[in-house]
Amino acid sequence: MQKILKLLIGLLALILIVLLMYGIFLKDKLDKEDSTDTNIVKLDTITTSLQGGTYHFLKVDLSLHSQTQSSELRAYMPQVRRTVLNLAMKQNGEVLLRNDGKKAFKQQIKTAILKQYGIQVQDVYFNNFVMAD
């Protein structure tokens, strides 16, 4: 009876491990898939130092949503990424900690892209936002 109980516990543990591993790999695959919305353009990861505060480094993955000009946005992608990088370098870590700081940063991105490239961005999505000291 004890052998059967140990066997069942071992089998359940094995099944749990397999399901856990499957879930991790499936989630990783889903995270890497591009959005099906063609109006959302994903930028490469931006990593930069910040202009003060207790947090000195920022790593951000972001996407831009342009309802009508996504193809133009893709055409200017290296320049747009550089614009966002320059804006990120000017940010203060203490300000970015707060929600209003993140909202202001998003607005700066939208304004800069409109001013420099004439492209209207409806929204900026932070897919990953990490600050470190």
Image (cartoon, rainbow, N blue to C red):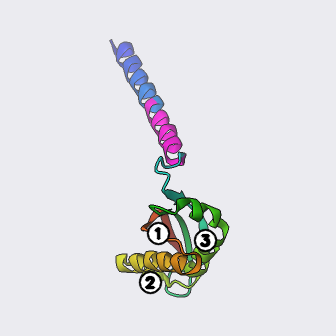
Q: Identify the secondary structure beneath mark 2.
A: helix
Q: Position of residue 28 (x, y in %)?
A: 52, 44
How far apart are the alpha carbons under marks 2 and 1?
A: 26 Å
Considering every residue shown, the one lying at the far left of the view is 1
Which amino acid type is marked by label 1? Val
* Residue at the (42%, 68%) spot, across then down: 122
Q: Tell me the residue that label 2 is attached to.
A: 94
Q: Are marks 2 and 1 in contact (CB under 8 Å)?
A: no
Q: Residues within 10 Å of mark 2 (few under 14, many from 20)?
A: some
Tell us which disc is closer to us: 2 or 3: 3
Q: Tell me the residue that label 1 is attached to.
A: 121
Q: Tell me the residue that label 3 is attached to.
A: 80
- Can residue 133 be seen by looking at this rendering? no
Q: Position of residue 64 (x, y in %)?
A: 49, 64
Which comes sooner in the sequence, label 2 or label 1?
Answer: 2
Q: Position of residue 16 (x, y in %)?
A: 41, 30
The quadrant where residue 72 appears: bottom right
Foreground pick, 35 / 130? 35
Image quadrant holding the C terminus, namely bottom right
* Residue at the (48%, 71%) spot, across then down: 120
Which amino acid type is marked by label 2? Glu
Image quadrant holding the N terminus, namely top left
Residue 67 vertical position relative to residue 97 in the rendered view, above or below: above
Foreground pick, 54 / 67? 67
State yes or no: residue 93 in magenta: no
Q: Which residues are magenta?
A: 19-32
